Amino acid sequence: SFAPQHILVTGGAGFIGANFVHWVARNHPQVHMTVLDALTYAGKRENLDGVPAANLTFVHGNICDAELVESLLSGLNQRSAAAVPPIDAIVHFAAESHNDNSILDASPFLNTNVTGTYVLLEAARRHDIRFHHISTDEVYGDLALDEQRKFTELSPYKPSSPYSASKAASDHLVRAWHRTHGLKTTISNCSNNYGPYQHVEKFIPRQITNILAGIRPKLYGQGLAVRDWISVEDHCSAIWTILTRGRIGETYLVGANGEYNNIDVLHMILKLMGRDANDFDHVNDRPGGDKRYAIDATKLQTELGWVPKYTDFKEGLAATIDWYRAHESWWMPDKAGTEEKYRKQGH
Ligand code: NAD
Ligand code: DAU
């Protein structure tokens, strides 16, 4: 097993990255983390508030900036006065992450998700650094609503959207850098996450904050598409497990058997928030929208003994609703602009 001392966390000011930084600081306080984040519309420095200063160096910058990445890996950019060991692992979250945005303009997806991953891989190769790539189940396309099958590590790549195509490309780069250059890589492909710090553009936070802001929730199409929901905490523990004990060169699927269709999730949110279950609008469906995702996480469970802890989805939703209620000043600044953009898309 591998015991990282200093991890470069790309995209650590975004939803999952920030949850991961908090998780590592809580569970493995001996580890130092350098967060490299461009603070796009999706990243906030304040997402890392509360992480002990001793655990964290924050660098505001772009993963496509090869010189900056090189300076971090060669230790030249180490600002903290205390002796911090050199970076010995990269956990790569940074990405453009939203499907609807990729339909409007794919170019930042190609820059960040493809070119950015390439820049990191090259730097990791020069320094022979352990590389864990965070990816998505969307690289496998979708499953039919009326089949039992789930995705496994052997499912063929078949991405549907510009976002998922860019993530598939990044996975292929990681696999190639392992096979050709011997880089010590692992990949995790996870299903839909929910929890604190998720941007209000995403399905669950959008509906919660709509209700809190007095806007009717918006359901795409008939709401029959199925997503396999996992608590972001469980995703973080899975990433740690794979980073420290995963077999080099391997891919692990991450999921927690949380399949629900969108309309059922919306009904749960409305009920938990004391609203009528029919108090929402149907809006345009996503062009090319994927029908169903479902993860078979047998490999991660049997090989590495990982088990999810937060498997009561309704309880997780209730906790997430409480978080958004208590953090209005966190999400409110993004709300009007996000809704205006959706209005223009007919969403
Ligand atoms: P997010 O959009 O909330 O956060 C992305 C972060 O990356 C932001 O902090 C942003 O500022 C930063 N970033 C973007 N471009 C950058 C660049 N060029 N240089 C440096 N930083 C940059 O995304 P998320 O939902 O936290 O997703 C994180 C990762 O997990 C992504 O790789 C995504 O594909 C993957 N993933 C997400 C989910 C999910 O349900 N959200 C599920 C599986 C996998
Ligand atoms: O599966 C993992 C993926 O999950 C990640 O790779 C992505 O980064 C992440 O954004 C997420 O992608 P989805 O497209 O599944 O998530 P999103 O929250 O955008 O939408 C979930 C479902 O809800 C989808 O079927 C579209 C629908 N939807 C979405 C919004 C924003 C609605 O019905 N109403 C909405 O307002």
Image (tube, rainbow, N blue to C red):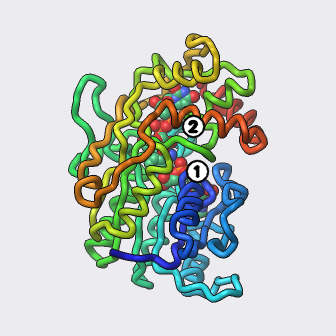
In this view of the protein, which residue sits in the foreground, 27 or 285?
27
Q: Are marks 2 and 1 in contact (CB under 8 Å)?
A: yes
Tag 2 residue? 202
Q: Is residue 189 above or below residue 174?
A: above
- Is residue 158 in view? yes
- Near mark 2 (Cα within 10 A), the count class, few <14, some 14-19 or many ≥20, is some
Residue at x 32%, y 35% (from the top left corner): 142
> The C terminus lies in which quarter of the figure?
top right
Q: Is residue 238 above or below residue 81?
A: above
Q: From the top left corner, tell me how far across and down residue 192 is, in percent.
A: 45, 41
* Label 1 beta carbon within 8 A of ligand 1: yes
Residue at x 53%, y 55% (from the top left corner): 95
Residue at x 57%, y 63% (from the top left corner): 26
Judged by depth in the image, the label closer to the viewer, 2 or 1, is 1
> Which three-letter amino acid code belongs to the residue tagged 2?
Lys
Q: CA distance from mark 2 to mark 1?
A: 11 Å
| Label 1: which secondary element | helix
